[in-house]
Amino acid sequence: PAAMPGILVGFRTALGQAWMAVVAAEIFGVAGVGQRMMQASSLLATDIVVVYMLTMAALYGLLDTAFVAFQGWVLRWKA
């Protein structure tokens, strides 16, 4: 149990790194939000690019918030 906080911090860091890999993969050709953002940037549609960037940031924020809530639930004995 004493190692659990460190393990969860490692998982949270890995989650952030994995999200960066997903965004990079989408930008470089995998179908998704990143590819649509690159198409919009080639058309100089900066408003659409900003919307896609905010969407990706909101998705990561939601994912991180959910993990922090899970971490708080798992570590409820620590508080």
Image: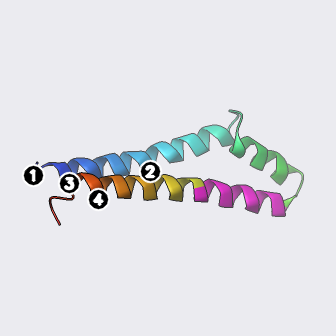
Horizontal side, residue 20 vs residue 9: left or right:
right
Would you call the spot at circle 1 few (<14 residues within 10 Å), some (14-19), or many (20 or more)? Answer: few
Residue stretch rendered in magenta on the structure? 46-58
Dot in front, 4 or 2: 4
In the rendered view, tell whether residue 75 sits above or below residue 15. below
Amino acid type, label 3: Pro
State the separation of the CA atoms marked 4 and 2. Answer: 18 Å
Amino acid type, label 1: Ala
State the separation of the CA atoms marked 4 and 3. Answer: 10 Å
Residue 8 in the image, given as x and y percentages of width and height = 27, 50
Would you call the spot at circle 2 few (<14 residues within 10 Å), some (14-19), or many (20 or more)? Answer: some
Say which element carries label 1.
loop
State the separation of the CA atoms marked 1 and 3. Answer: 7 Å
For residue 47, which quarter of the picture? bottom right
Question: In the image, what residue occupies the spot 34% across and 52% down?
Answer: 70
Which one is earlier in the sequence, the residue at label 3 or at label 2? 3
Which one is earlier in the sequence, the residue at label 4 or at label 3? 3
Q: Colour scheme of this structure image?
A: rainbow
Q: Which residue is mark 3?
A: 5
**Front-lying residue, 51 or 38:** 51
The C terminus is located in which quarter?
Answer: bottom left
Residue 75 in the image, given as x and y percentages of width and height = 21, 56
Horizontal side, residue 33 vs residue 39: left or right:
left
Residue 49 in the image, given as x and y percentages of width and height = 77, 57
Asked whether the residues under the numbered discs 1 and 3 touch, taking CB atoms below 8 Å apart as contact, a structural biologist would say yes
Dot in front, 3 or 2: 3
Q: Which residue is mark 1?
A: 2
Would you call the spot at circle 3 few (<14 residues within 10 Å), some (14-19), or many (20 or more)? Answer: some
Which one is earlier in the sequence, the residue at label 2 or at label 1? 1
Q: Which residue is mark 2?
A: 16
Q: Which residue is mark 4?
A: 72
Would you call the spot at circle 4 few (<14 residues within 10 Å), some (14-19), or many (20 or more)? Answer: some
